[in-house]
Amino acid sequence: MGLRVEEGGASEGRAVTVRIGVEPHGDITPRASGQTSAWSLGTRERGQAAQEGKQMTAAPAMMDGPPPAAHTAGAPAGEVMDWHSIDWDQAQRIVRRLQARIVQATQAGRWGKVKALQRLLTHSFSGKALAVRRVTENQGKRTPGVDHVTWETPAKKMAAVRGVRQRGYRPQPLRRVSIAKSNGKLRGLNIPTMKDRAMQALYLLALDPIAEVTADPNSYGFRQERSPADAMQQCFVVLSHTDSAHWVLEGDIRACFDALSHEWLEAHIPMDKAILHAWLKAGYMDKRVLHPTEHGAPQGGIASPVLANLALDGLERELRDRYPKTTRRGRAPQVNLVRFADDFIITGDSKEVLEDEVTPLVGRFLAARGLELSPEKTVITHIADGFDFLGQNVRKYEGTLVIKPSRKSVKALLDKVRTYAKAHKQMTAGHLIEHLNPLIRGWALYHRHVASADTFASVDAAIFRTIWRWAKRRHPHKTTAWVKRKYFRSYQARNWVFYWKEQEGLCPICHHKITTLTGWHNHHLTWRSKGGSDREENRVLLHPTCHNRVHSHHISVVKPRPATGV
């Protein structure tokens, strides 16, 4: 599905893909923009003419002071714009239009224009507003940095939009916390301040289009519209045939985020060098002690995954140059890369090719970026023995490739369920289910794309046994039949996925996608306080910001009609 970039009613380029305007080229498989005045996003008064189709210029969008009357479209002169008056649909169109132009300039190799468009976007009101919205709607919105500041109210959010500016910007140190890894070790997680997160989100809007254009075709981690399921699909494509490669290099990069070379990043990342340098050298606070950062991109920063992706992009191109698909000699080794963040696999027709040729090539590529392979996690495996990748087990059984949830992933889920049930023996059944359901549902949704029916059945049985033991412990003197009647009655649970599908995944207020990144609120069309029911036909999902806007402006919401039926 494509879209075209329009300016003043005229087409500005070729069809581009649905996300931000990346035009597919080569062997990349595609996966399943308005006016730029900084002061044009206020909700228009009724009867006020909309100023559409104006030529995009840099000057109005780079202004930092209060809005001049000449650039005020939609709010009376002198009126202070509030958070809920921002036209988010128009803000999205402006940013997407700029991103599409960045894509076109990148594809044409016009890096001077790319830099100018990036500056325009990062100085625009639309970009700043969307950046603040992102960091105040994600899961870490209530987690402060070293300054202990969060932006909970609309007034604080609007003040934050005005406060996000480049002149005099100096990031504060990151707050370091330690979280446990699956192997028992601790991993440092760095938490920026809200202002630094907003600045990273702002520059990410301008960096993401370039990252999408220059990305390796089979890179799937930390990219919108791509997921682990896409990576597993590519694994199936390169390994399922009878004449596919039989050997797999399981690669893992040691401390990828912590070891990235600052010199390489500052020399190769296409963004404002001063801002990037300030981020990388901000340091972190651990137990009230300031530590400098000499290398690495801090885990926990919004922009860090894209920085890491840009550093690792190019590996697949080096493999293609060494083993070109256009020649029989290049195709013979059957070398293919599938990468998700810093985890990757490379296929080969023999162990010797992977060991003597591919591994040294990967080592040299990583060394230039200050990285190295992890010896304990990097192994070469025969496909008949199978390997684990992204929580799935990939193995050929008598020539048939089967991808299913890995034993490690199943064990991790069941351990969490059993540990929680055992630690909360006196919890009510409702509270127990309220905690466990999201955990189980999330795990099942992650693994639903592979051959998981048998695994789901065994996991379901194991969870049932755990809940049954929990129920029996609560009522040791009751009969089995009594426990069954009390806790295991049939009930059609509410299904939020149903609402999402009914709306085609779109918010009916701003008409943009509802995702786990944006979050959502459940809105009653007729309020409960006014006699509205709690049934499905009286519910609709909205973005949190759109939901707040509905209540503050008393906007009427209409439930979207299903795509089929009458």
Image: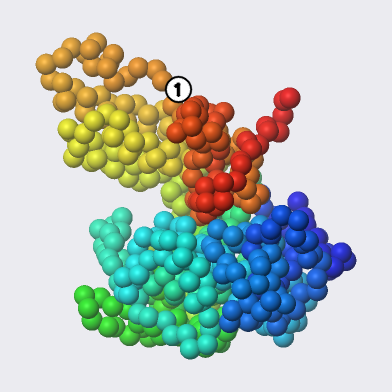
Examine the rendering and report whether any part of residue 153 can be seen: yes
Left or right of 240, for residue 144: left
| Residue farthest toward the right in the current orientation of the protein | 10
Identify whether 145 is placed above or below 227.
Answer: below
Return the x and y of residue 36 as percentages of the image width and height: 71, 72
Q: Secondary structure at mark 1?
A: loop
Count of marks, rendered view: 1
Left or right of 298, for residue 110: right
Closest to the observer, 249 or 253: 253
Q: For mark 1, does the 10 Å Cα neighbourhood hold few (<14), some (14 to 19), or many (20 or more) residues?
A: few
Identify whether 113 is placed above or below 159.
Answer: below
Q: Residue at x 63, y 81 (%)?
A: 63
Return the x and y of residue 412 as percentages of the image width and height: 32, 45
Closest to the observer, 445 or 374: 445
What's the residue type where badge 1 is placed?
Gln
| Residue farthest toward the left in the current orientation of the protein | 477
Quadrant, the C terminus: top right
Q: Residue at x 18, y 33 (%)?
A: 425
Identify whether 317 is placed above or below 114.
Answer: above
Return the x and y of residue 540 as percentages of the image width and height: 56, 38
Left or right of 510, for residue 303: left
Which residue matches tag 1? 492
Q: Residue at x 66, y 79 (%)?
A: 68
Examine the rendering and report whether any part of residue 26 can be seen: no
Identify whether 180 is placed above or below 368.
Answer: above
Closest to the observer, 33 or 314: 33
Q: Residue at x 66, y 72 (%)?
A: 77
Closest to the observer, 114 or 56: 56
Return the x and y of residue 463 as percentages of the image width and height: 32, 31
Q: Quadrant of residue 336?
A: bottom right
